[in-house]
């Protein structure tokens, strides 16, 4: 019984910032994202974290969740740069992550 109450309480806690859900359809997404291979083409350099708490309050640190209700932002990947709201490049290192210039999405991803 206590476990059920604990699980219910945890489900009610809002997701931490930087939690991302990838949708199958563009109309379900908050942001349409294009992934580029080159950091100089990107608006945002993204580092993927292993734990949700590591992405708290950072636009550039993303934690991917399997459930849309846990996400701060839902994204949809596009194959075409001209369809994208945001261009990103994934980086292996946290210190490289961040905005590369001005963007309308800055400070709005969490």
Image (cartoon, rainbow, N blue to C red):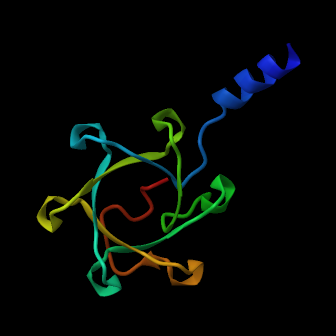
Identify the residue at horizontal 66%, vertical 33% (top origin): 13
Residue 16 falls left or right of residue 27: right
Identify the residue at horizontal 35%, vertical 83% (top origin): 39
Residue 31 falls left or right of residue 4: left
Question: Residue pushed farthest right?
Answer: 2
Question: Residue pushed farthest top?
Answer: 1
Q: Is residue 77 above or below residue 47?
A: above
Residue 63 lies in what quarter of the image? bottom right
- In the rendered image, the quadrant that contains the N terminus is top right
Q: Which x, y percent locates residue 70?
A: 54, 38
Question: Residue pushed farthest left?
Answer: 82
Image label count: 0
Residue 7 lies in what quarter of the image? top right
Identify the residue at horizontal 49%, vertical 68% (top origin): 60
Q: Is residue 68 above or below residue 52?
A: above
Identify the residue at horizontal 51%, vertical 84% (top origin): 96
Q: Is residue 3 above or below residue 18?
A: above
Q: Which x, y percent locates residue 104?
A: 30, 63
Q: Which x, y percent locates residue 24?
A: 30, 42
Q: Which x, y percent locates residue 5?
A: 79, 18
């Amino acid at each position: 019984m206590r476990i059920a109450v604990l699980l219910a309480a945890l489900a009610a806690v809002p997701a931490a910032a930087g939690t991302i859900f990838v949708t199958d359809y563009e109309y379900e997404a908050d942001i349409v994202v294009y992934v580029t291979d080159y950091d100089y083409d990107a608006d945002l350099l993204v580092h993927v974290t292993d734990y949700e708490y590591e992405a708290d309050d950072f636009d550039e640190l993303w934690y991917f969740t399997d459930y849309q209700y846990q996400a701060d932002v839902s994204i949809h990947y596009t194959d075409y740069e001209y369809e994208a709201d945001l261009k990103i490049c994934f980086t292996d290192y946290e210190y490289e992550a961040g905005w590369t210039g001005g963007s309308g999405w800055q400070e709005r991803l969490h």
